[in-house]
Amino acid sequence: MKTERLLAITMILLDKKQISASQLAKTLEVSVRTIYRDIHSLSEAGIPVTTLPGINGGIQIMDNYKIDKNFFTSSDITSLLIALESLSQNVSPIQINQTFEKIKTLIPANFLEEIEFKSNQIAIDLTPWTSNHTLQPFLEIIKTAMDQSRSLCFDYEDNHGRKTKRIVEPYRLVLKEISWYLQAYCLEKEDFRTFKISRIQNLAFSSTFVPREFKAQPLGHEPFYGKKFTLITLKVTNKIREQLVDKFGPLHYSPYKDTEKLIVSFPFMEDDFGYNLLLSFGNQCECLEPPHVRAELKSRIENLLELYQNN
């Protein structure tokens, strides 16, 4: 972790020329004391980093300094290549090729074969099983808008089916599981909002804007805030066990009598997402308790059956 942080500090200094310790600490989410220890480590490694006191002071790196190829280990460059490869399906191939070429200039000749071998040991494929053909063009438009500080206008449909027209200032693209999200300032709501890209239609550029202060917020916590979990017990097959591990991590399983099925308990959120998740497992999963969750599942199944019987 420290090596990655030292590399990040070096790249920030090469880009910004000068920055305060407090700004670096905020950016890297560490203490100011840690930043000063890292600066000392960089100096000991031979990188010409200096600190200037005063109001207009800060941390800077010597002009015209270039990173020595030996500064990067084979593991550092392998990690960079794997990360780039994982995004290659969603980012412009031209941009990827240009970045690859730049990184290759950092590889000492005696490391080339080793790095190529290591980078082929891990493959990260972030593309969904079924592709959305509108996704790639939308990502390119949004990225261009962020680079040029141009606002975007589009039609948006929320998860309740409500359709609205939005004009937003784009600030951040986020990939969460298999879905892309846009974090932007909505001029209609006069606040920051998160938009799911797959719900956007008729995306187009609008006027330029002056970027405002944006504090990135992680996705994934909002839907669970203030909600209670219910401990449920399921009878599942080995096939479902793998899917549960993927979604919830290691769980404790016990055999169910003399069958090949298993018993497992885990915290369950009683909302549409939770019930739809259980129903998506079909006859590979049965809720045993508590009774009210089992009854709700039965009611939903009966409603679905009624729908098909009526038609």
Image: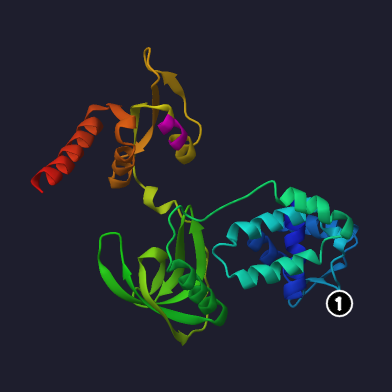
Residue at x-position 51% and y-position 32%: 250
Query: In the rendering, at what x and y percent does residue 43 appear?
Result: 88, 61
Residue at x-position 53% and y-position 74%: 143
Q: Quadrant of the rendered structure where residue 31 is? A: bottom right
* Crowd rating for badge 1 (residues with CA inside 10 Å; few <14, some 14–19, many 20+): few
**Amino acid under disc 1:** Asn
259 part of magenta stretch: no
Left or right placement of residue 66 versus residue 153 in this view = right
Q: Is residue 3 above or below residue 148?
A: above
Q: Is residue 184 above or below residue 242?
A: below
Nearest the viewer among 63 and 242 is 242
Nearest the viewer among 123 and 7 is 123
Query: In the rendering, at what x and y percent does residue 133 appear?
Result: 43, 66
Query: In the rendering, at what x and y percent does residue 95 appear?
Result: 64, 71
Query: In the rendering, at what x and y percent does residue 120 appear?
Result: 70, 50
Q: Looking at this rendering, what residue extends furthest in the top direction?
A: 258
Q: Quadrant of the rendered structure where residue 21 is? A: bottom right
Left or right placement of residue 290 versus residue 262 in this view = left
Nearest the viewer among 150 and 82 is 82
Per the image, the residue denoted by label 1 is 64
Q: How is the image coloured?
A: rainbow
Magenta: main secondary structure:
helix
| Residue range (magenta) | 239-243
Q: Is residue 30 visible?
A: no
Q: How many numbered discs sit on the rendered protein?
A: 1
Residue at x-position 54% and y-position 64%: 90
242 part of magenta stretch: yes
